[in-house]
Image (cartoon, helix red, strand yellow):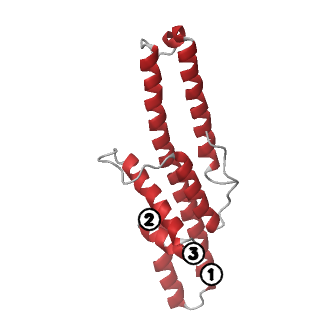
Amino acid sequence: MSPLDAVWEWYEVACDSMRFAAHRIRTQPEEVSAWPALSPMDTDVAVEKLRKTQAELDDLTVLALFAVFEQALLDRLAAASKTLQQTVVTAIEKSLAAAALGNLDRWPLDDILNVCKAEVDPEVVGLVKQVKAYRDWVAHGKKRKPSARIVPREAHDRLSEFLRALRIAISPNPATP
């Protein structure tokens, strides 16, 4: 099971719910008044509000996927660090390993991603860095235009491919919402 699966599951449920809401509003416009967040709007305005909400959900899903990915990556590297530290024999080697590998969570993420090029195709690392840049854009208030728009499916696929390369538990690709 992938660490990304839980995020993908709630994303699919939320997308289905918004599609259902938009369908109901279009087919039974008199029900808009029953939805406090959409009332008192006409049908077109309510559907447009749902469209904008979907766009926000997509951005927040990329952010959530990346947060889960980052923690899975740090956990994997922490385990590798412990294994490595157990193989060194001299006191100076142990001290050097502890200094070099300690506090991985404080390393710049781009540096961590670059280290992973030893096992992950550099092109995949570049694609993950694009997801990171988009995540940063979302997380920091969407100032200016992003260098590339990343949709949840792309983020999921890129992050999954990276995790697979590091042999972090991954299930097959989920269905597209």
Tell me which label, 2 or 3, sits earlier in the chain.
3
What is the crowding at mark 1: few (fewer than 14 residues within 10 Å), some, or many (at least 20)? few
101 and 163: which one is in front? 163
- Residue drawn at point x = 62 percent, y = 67 percent: 165
- Residue drawn at point x = 56 percent, y = 63 percent: 73
What is the crowding at mark 2: few (fewer than 14 residues within 10 Å), some, or many (at least 20)? some
Q: Is residue 85 visible?
A: yes
Q: CA distance from mark 2 to mark 3?
A: 16 Å
Residue 108 occupies which quadrant of the picture?
bottom left
Q: Nearer the viewer, mark 2 or mark 3?
A: 2
Q: Nearer the viewer, mark 1 or mark 2?
A: 2
Image mark for residue 63: none
Label 2 element class: helix
Q: Position of residue 135 (x, y in %)?
A: 43, 51
Q: Which amino acid, mark 1?
A: Gln
Q: Which residue was labeled with disc 1?
A: 86
Q: Which residue was labeled with disc 3?
A: 81
Q: CA distance from mark 3 to mark 1?
A: 9 Å
Residue 87 occupies which quadrant of the picture?
bottom right
Label 1 element class: helix
Q: Which amino acid, mark 2?
A: Leu
Q: Which residue was labeled with disc 2?
A: 109
